[in-house]
Amino acid sequence: MSNLSELVAASRLPGEPIHTPMFIGGKPWRGSQDERVVRKSPAHGVAVTSTQRASVADLDAAVSAARQAFDDGRWSRLPAEQRATVLLKTAQLIREQADTLAWFETLESGKPLAQSRGEILGAAGIWEYAAGLARIVHGDTHDSLGERMFGLVLRQPVGVVGIITPWNFPFFILSERLPFALAAGCTVVVKPAELTPTTTLRLATLLAEAGLPEGVVNVVTGLGSVVGQALADHPDVDMISFTGSTSVGQSVMRAAAGNMKKVGLELGGKNPQIVFADADLDDAADAIAFGISFNAGQCCVSGSRLVVHRSVEAELVERVRAVLARVRVGDPLDAANHVGAIVEARQFAKIRGYIEAGRESQAQLVCGGESSSEGERYFVSPTVFRHVDPRGALAQEEIFGPVLAVTPFDTFDEAVALANGVPFGLAASIWTRDLEGAMQSLRAVQAGRIWVNCTITGGPELPIGGFKQSGIGRETGRYGLEEYTELKSVHVQLGARARWMA
Ligand code: NAD
């Protein structure tokens, strides 16, 4: 095999799968069954990485390492300044390793290399932000309780956190959670998605290099139905932060009930782009095309529904079509391509199923609809359907592919009803030049994230999360960090206490 840095520099495929072990108790962990799973690049049909399939015994070892590391205070009782130093050092190592991490991310996920690189560098910025936040975690004092009483509210780390992540943004989504849990003083067991575990495993070694004490972060790879489930069930885990599908989120919530774990759930979306008649249509068209094509539509905040005023519907759809006509789909290692591969055969078949159902419905196919799975390489071109029944599957269900469903509206109330008329409430974009209209819409639309005259943008400062079946709790920002804490109220008697039995 060629040297890793040469392969990365040349954006080439490895000659044989590159193995990365699990990470438990500060060390590489072989796994009790040493069973390996090979991942093929979904854009090339070639085996690129291998990882272990953990057993429940491995998961128990990881939880036990995290439990011990939490209980002895090696991390939670460190001065926050020292925790911040480790997070900052980690950010620096992520930046130094950005090319390699991005290369692995692209090989396993199929996303364009430049996008992967942007996500890795963006993730480094989140680690830096969380490092600052570590130093401002604080509680409250209540000096208003009278002469003889003083009140304190302590904000303490919740304990051992299990973080379960999906395959669509493996490194970025992890970085929206892990540094916040660490900033709060928690210890962690991470279970990355089966399809994209390598960058998470490599991050564990960077954390060790940055000086993170042993056992504070442990990574276990393997099947969600086995190790993910065991993590959600585990009586020694105090909180689960789960990001993934709504159906698995429901099962995680049921499992968490066993020992009343705290849960954070970031789930699916069916996000509307709401375009009013006075919007800048060129700007909106560009963003709508981006919103459905980004990450090949495999994005929880993908703008998969276009809810548009009837008077501009035809014109806007034509402009979206014109932008999409310039989108190049193909090999994510080729810098000329904007959209890479679909992550795997099952997801590809699911998207194809929705496109076929759309063709057979009364909806009109405007563009796209083509796909290819030749040589175990999975590509779907961005697809737009007009005249979509708002109650039908195309408009109601999360496809998680580059498929846009267009539905017109006539009145403001109808726009809001369409926007809110799905079980999800993750994100929404509003396009208008009218300030009052924008304000009234953002008040009325049920979504955890709203973009006005922009889409899929932001940073770690603001919280993210969903309404309705899109989740529970928030990640990132001050609120995100607070999710990884518990509050403790303390009343301190000053002077003599009034006796019960005088
Ligand atoms: P998924 O639910 O299939 O898997 C997510 C993770 O859960 C994986 O690590 C998987 O191994 C694990 N898992 C599977 N079964 C489990 C079980 N029984 N118990 C515990 N863990 C289990 O989701 P996916 O296919 O990887 O990702 C796509 C989904 O994720 C989409 O629905 C998307 O909307 C959602 N998502 C949401 C956000 C968000 O922030 N709201 C972000 C990204 C993805």
Image: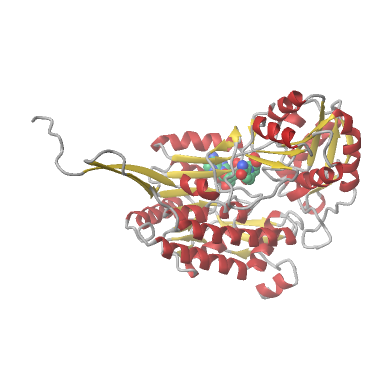
**In the image, residue 353 lies at what x, y percent?**
78, 35
Q: In this view, does 339 lie above or below 365?
A: below
Of the 4 image quadrants, the one containing the N terminus is bottom right
Q: Who is closer to the viewer here, 104 or 311? A: 311
What residue is drawn where x is 54% and y is 54%? 221
What residue is drawn where x is 57% and y is 45%? 463
**Horizontal side of residue 422 vs 194, given as left or right:** right
Mark yes or no: residue 363 visible.
Answer: yes
**Horizontal side of residue 377 vs 29, given as left or right:** right
| Image quadrant in which you'd find residue 136 | bottom left
| Image quadrant in which you'd find residue 352 | top right
**Horizontal side of residue 479 vs 213, given as left or right:** right
**In the image, residue 501 lies at what x, y percent?**
9, 30
Q: Who is closer to the viewer here, 27 or 151? A: 151
**In the image, residue 425 lies at what x, y percent?**
64, 34
Return the residue found at the far left: 502
Mark yes or no: residue 206 visible.
Answer: no
Q: In this view, does 327 lie above or below 253?
A: below
Of the 4 image quadrants, the one containing the C terminus is top left
